[in-house]
Amino acid sequence: YDEVIGNDGDEDVVVLKHKEEPISTEDDDEFEREFSKMMSESIESRKFEKKSLILDVPIPMNLRGAQGKRKKREIYANARANEDDSHMSFTLLTKKGNRQQVKVMEVPSDSVLAVSTRSKQEAEREE
Amino acid sequence: EDTDDFDAFGEGLGPLEEKDLPSHACNYCGIHAPASVVKCVTCDRWFCNARGHTSGSHIINHLVRAKHKEVMLHPESPLGETVLECYNCGCRNVFLLGFIPAKSDTVVVLLCRQPCAAVPSSKDMNWDTTQWMPLIGDRCFLTWLVKIPSEQEQLRARQITSQQINKLEELWKENSEATLEDLEKPGVDDEPHPILLRYEDAYQYQNICGPLVKMEADYDRKLKESQTCDDIVVRWDVGLNQKNIAWFYFPKLEMGEVKLAVGDELRLRYRGELHEPWEGVGHVIKIPNNVSDEVALELRLLDRAPVECTHNFSVDFVWKSTSFDRMQLAMRTFAVDETSVSGYIYHRLLGHDVEPQVLKTQMPKRFSAPNLPELNHSQVYAVKSVLQRPLNLIQGPPGTGKTVTSASIVYHLAKMNPGQVLVCAPSNVAVDQLSEKIHQTGLKVVRVTAKSREELDSPVSFLTLHEQVLNNDTNVELQKLIMLKREQGELSASDEKKYKSLKRACEKEILQNADVICCTSVGAGDPRVSKLRFRTVLIDEATQASEPECMIPLVLGCKQVVLVGDHQQLGPVIMNKKAARAGLCQSLFERLVILGIRPIRLQVQYRMHPCLSEFPSNMFYEGTLQNGITTQERLRKNVDFPWPVPETPMMFYVNLGNEEISTSGTSYLNRTEASNCEKIVTRFMKAGILPSQIGVVTPYEGQRSYIVQYMQFNGSLRKDLYKEIEVASVDAFQGREKDYIILSCVRSNEHQGIGFLSDPRRLNVALTRAKYGVVILGNPKVLSKHPLWHHLLVHYKEKGCLVDGALNNLRVSMIQFSRPRKAYR
Ligand SMILES: [Zn+2]
Ligand SMILES: [Zn+2]
Ligand SMILES: [Zn+2]
């Protein structure tokens, strides 16, 4: 969690040049308090949720391991065509009704997700 | 994309053709690139992921302000039409959602933080829950999920402020079709009538201030009544007075909105299966502090609490209108009762021009009071002026001996004037301190407390009215009844009636024999006090009371008034923004200053090492603060601490760590600063500084509790030493001092303001608590954007006291400051 925030800092932020006035106003302070409240209430509300929902999400066979990767590369050739070093492709699993769907998601290479995945892959390769 | 739309934006502030925008355009700014907008599923409105002029992105602004939580991506966005939800349980609350990656594939799913992602990662699981990352970071959706519009797009979009967003959201609650243009229409913006500088008469005064007090009261009630907290686990205990005490953790407190104070009433309810439904009301006798995060609630004897049960309790606030009622009553009295204040005071309070009045008084030979320290020249001047004038303001900057001066003034006023002097302050702590000092002069002091505080331990309990009643030996019958009541817990109806009337008579006698009566400003509305008349009134900490609160002690017949305070330190706390904006947050003291009444300033400070008073003096007191204390008296030679310049014990320690939302999702914390804070505290203690003489000041509750925990778990010295270190907000330190102060600023986020720290008065208080040394932990890059902090940083830099690196190897920092946004003053 630390790292997420750590890396989410300056890089991917658009700073507008005309923004000269101080950002902090009463309304902003109030927004921040409300934001914190929203976060905490969301978590509070599920504190006592049963943990019986075991995390049992299978990874579809076609996305698994090295073979899957090759296959995936074929499937999403288009999406990957214009990929450069600045992004890394991930597959996002979602559900529509009971049907599983897969979607390609481009993630910046310097995001925590990409960096940690790459280092995991490298570690695996060395094994 | 249709560029014509953009040309319409190019007009800047010109009228915007709402009909030309596609339906998925951001309802705030009009941006409509499919990859940059999401739909709020609850209200079917679209918003973009740009921050514009606010600290959160537009969609987050909307979700927070409308309390909506579910969103959908645009059909033409890279991921196509997608409702964001937990893959496992279907939860759609985006404030709980985050990605987790598979252990060995480039596959991710969305999971909710609680409970699905809270399952520890096991070996045979495909997913790595330790890598969970939230969808919302820095109050914005992950920018690779919802693209941030380009700079071009943002520049061309409608420029909307936080304030406009707020109003638009309010408007939508009544009319879902409302647009930004509707904001301009008359009648929409029903701000209350603001306070005035001068008032025609006391009726106008009441007509303007009354509604503001009502707004604040309504807000306070709503806030308190919404604070019900279920699933409270109680630990039972019995006090020395045989009353049951419930100990519990109260999670709502961390939100910082509701301030719980000792003496407040809470209702505890039981709704479990082990006991029949039960409820009881009690008084808070302990609030979370550095020793424990628990709240202690003392219940009434009669309530027969189910002490065998521990779970399934709920807690509600019990809202009381007393203080607001007393303010309203005071303003009404001011309006209708001609004798409530003297004619001169009446006109001065309303801001009318009147001939200055000088009271014919026999000046005392000696201005210092018996048993109190000798007064310095500016203090003598203050006492002298006060005795001759009917209305006085005394400004007491930090460490200038405000309490001694006030006590000396009260001594002379009591000796010179007929009748009793009424001495008030908004807080109980200040009243207690002042009562004790006045008592030292030999005057007969009675401290009147609220009934709810009678059981609380206080350093001046021997001065309190109820103790004096208990200890009086003139009325044998009353004493008998008191004994009986103590033994039996209650009295028969007829005895109770007799007891009450005897007690009232006894109270009256004690009050009449007193020289000085002390109570809080709200306490002055207690019938035991308000039935009396007071010609002479002194209000301490007058800059911390709202104006109507200040009126309560004034309308009891005053002819001579002394207001003591410092309008360069923290002012009254007003919760309702509208009421605050309309001026309720301005103290009477401040208004009188604006009206041209010059406060007499106490000018010699005896607290801070001269290097510590230099910046506050220049910045807040036009350089007039003199040091009554020398460098030598404030240097501790045998204390081994790595001050960059040993003879100036101050440093700004550069900490670039990031702030985060605290573990419970509320408030802010900064781990780097917490860890350095522990190191500094440890270093101080190793050098022989008592833990009770070290204070840690931090503006955020999240950081407060994090530092307390961090020191407990990571401190290298004995754990209980760290417990003695006070970690608290700036506000909690107002009026107090420590040998060493560490200030942890927390905020290091580029997109927000620096929140609480941007208030110059709060900064003044934070910087002026220490006698021997100050360490500030913060991020100069962020803080220097604020003009006042920029000055402070330059000051520390010029003194060679801006450092970074490890604590045992500090170097002068070369960090570049940011350009401040706007000149200060
Ligand atoms: Zn927008
Ligand atoms: Zn909505
Ligand atoms: Zn879930």
Image (cartoon, coloured by chain):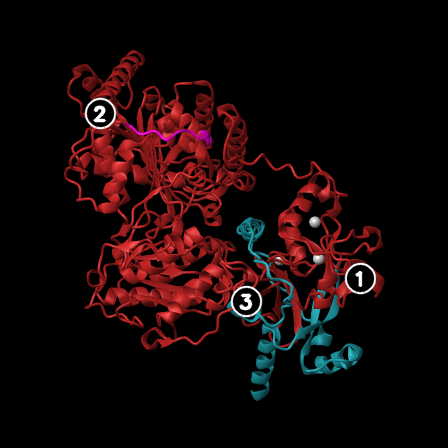
Chain colours: A cyan, B red
Query: On residue B514, which mark appears?
Result: 2
Which of labels 3 and 1 is toward the front?
Answer: 1
Question: As drawn, which residue projects farthest toward the top?
Answer: B494
Which residue occupies 68% across, 71% down? A59
Horizontal arrangement in the rendering, residue B821 relative to residue B506 (left or right): right
Q: Secondary structure at mark 2?
A: loop
Quadrant location, ligand no. 1? bottom right
- Give above or below for B28 relative to B557: below
Count residues near mark 1 (Cα–Cα under 10 Å), then give few for <14, some for 14-19, many for 20+.
some
- x%, y% of residue B820? 52, 64
Q: Name the quadrant containing residue B116.
A: bottom right
Q: Name the quadrant containing residue B646.
A: bottom left
Q: Determine the main secondary structure of the stretch shown in magenta.
A: loop
The residue lying toward the viewer, choosing from B250 and B277, is B250
Query: On residue A5, which mark appears?
Result: 3
Q: Are marks 3 and 2 in contact (CB under 8 Å)?
A: no
Segment tinted magenta in the rendering: B350-359
- x%, y% of residue A9? 56, 69
- Give above or below for B264 relative to A21: above
- x%, y% of residue A36? 54, 53
Q: Residue type at mark 1?
A: Phe
Chain under disc 2? B
Horizontal arrangement in the rendering, residue A15 relative to residue B38 (left or right): left
Count residues near mark 2 (Cα–Cα under 10 Å), then give few for <14, some for 14-19, many for 20+.
some
Q: CA distance from mark 3 to mark 1?
A: 34 Å
Chain under disc 1? B
